[in-house]
Image (cartoon, rainbow, N blue to C red):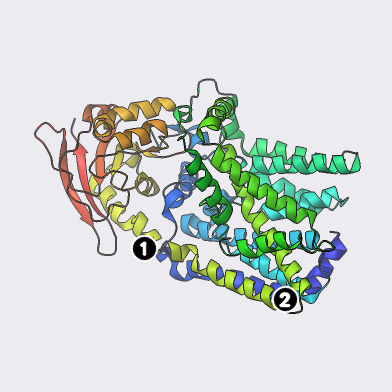
Amino acid sequence: MKKKSIKSALDNSKWQIIAALILIFLYITPYIYLGKDSHIRIHDNLDSNLVWAKTVLNSGEFFSAPDREIQQVFNGIPRSSLYGTYDISLFWFKLFGAYYGYVFNKLIMSLVAFFGMFYLLKKLIQPDKKSDSFIITGVSVLFAMLPFWSFTLSVAGLPIVLYAFLNLKNGSRHSTNWLIIGLFPFYSSLVLSGIFFIVLLLLILVYDFYQNKTINIPFVKGILLISILYGISHFPIIYSFAFNPDYVSHRIETKLPELSFKNAYIRAKTLFTAGHYHADSLHKYIFYPILFVFILQFFFKRTYKYKTYNYLLVFVFLVSIMYGILLWGPVLTLHKKFIEIIPLQIDRFYNLHPMFWYVLLGFSLIVISRKWDFGKYIAYMIIVIQFVFILTNHELNTNKNEPSYSNFFAEELFEEIKDYIDKPTDSYRVISLGIHPSIALYNGFYTLDGYFPDYPLVYKHKFRKVIAKELDKAPYLATYYDEWGSRCYAFSKELGRNYLNANPKKIKNLDFNYDELKKLGGKYILSSAEITLKQDDNIKFLEIFEIFHSDWKIYVYEVLD
């Protein structure tokens, strides 16, 4: 779309866009109104991503070398393991702090998602009616209000970068396209969506060559640019895996679960009809009008045959099949061999699905509105119903039964613990029991445990010696640690995988190897449960810490010399 046509689209839809932006800001407002009392997703978020960003900034290793060690974790963890990218989102955390940096990133994600989907749909559908414009704006708002995971543009930014590439493909030379492509690798994850988006671009390139018998040079230049810039932005993680012979990741011990054909089918069906937890498209209900329009075209041969529509739906379907079948017995062996060569989670093509589902929704509602006189009202009703469904799935609503941000991190409580210990935090190490180690890490403690998708294998083995007897008592915990291990936690059989242990029972028999813990520098245990001490235990109870507005009661134990 040329610059003039973009301006025209804005002029014709300006009041709809203003209304859309108001809705997006209202969607973000509860984060500001509630502040740290907001109930934000904990799993794969507060227990990990946000704290990794905060720890990198606290260490001062913003753009440091990838093998530079950050001492606050594991007695020194490579910067590439803690945060494997040079990412724009870190600037917002630096400017606004951990919580409001997270909120500001949410706002950026929603705005980019809206304008990206808006322009992409305009380009693909080429509206010619007022109702078309309303549908496109409405669908763009729906996409912008999805509960995007964490705080990068890995999913939310895909429409705008695809729009830029389609402009290159169609001959546009506007500098905005290159700017979008140039920024995206520094605000998204290569391993989550970037590499899969590049594969999509290559498929488009091949199809274009098949259609036109010529190679689209600007499009190829765009692919080369985004690939090179991903190499720069993700240099820390690329360096660790490709250029550091001394680094061995704990991921080499990862074992994929084997599924029966029935369970593989269920896994594929669930992705196709309901989406994925890390790329939540909330398409449970819009799935039906999309499928309806797909079937409709076979009964009305003269119109409504959108090639793009069919290609996208088939792509989503095939990716869903792949997602299930990769863990099916006969395919799993080949899958494992692929991972040995390229340590990549290849089923993550599902991160492209939210963009495709809402492009499909835009197409389907346009078809419905044009097919019947009353069709536009059906389309408007579907948008409203989906809008309400998305609101009910707002992050602050779906996590309301979990601790709030402030209660989870309990800064005042952990400040009291630091004051009680009364030593420089870098002079001792702690482990957490019954609570996520990210809480101690967030509050400035130096931790021997934590949750990281990639860290040195040698440390995994060292820490295992501390918890070995507890793992022996609980085979499911041993399997979880040995065959995955990204949660390098101080597991106990009695607590299991309960990391939000706010009202725990007493731990009657904790069999940690305290000598091994001392070798790692472990000096204190921060436990959400009281530990029954035995005569031969080499720890002593110090104090209980609790404050009235926190969910936690923390028992502090000292490891004796």
Residue occupying the far top of the picture: 245
SS at mark 1 in the image: loop
Mark 2 highlights which residue? 376
Position of 480 with respect to 422 (left or right) is right
Residue 401's disc number: 1
Dot 1 or dot 2, earlier in sequence: 2
Query: In terms of depth relative to the viewer, which is nearer, 490 or 66?
Result: 490
Q: Up-down: is 479 above or below 406? A: above
Q: Nearer the viewer, mark 1 or mark 2?
A: 2
Quick one: quadrant of the C terminus? Answer: top left
Q: How many marks?
A: 2
Residue 156 shows in the view = no
Q: Amino acid at mark 2?
A: Lys
Query: In terms of depth relative to the viewer, which is nearer, 435 or 117?
Result: 117
Residue 127 shows in the view = yes
Q: Amino acid at mark 1?
A: Asn
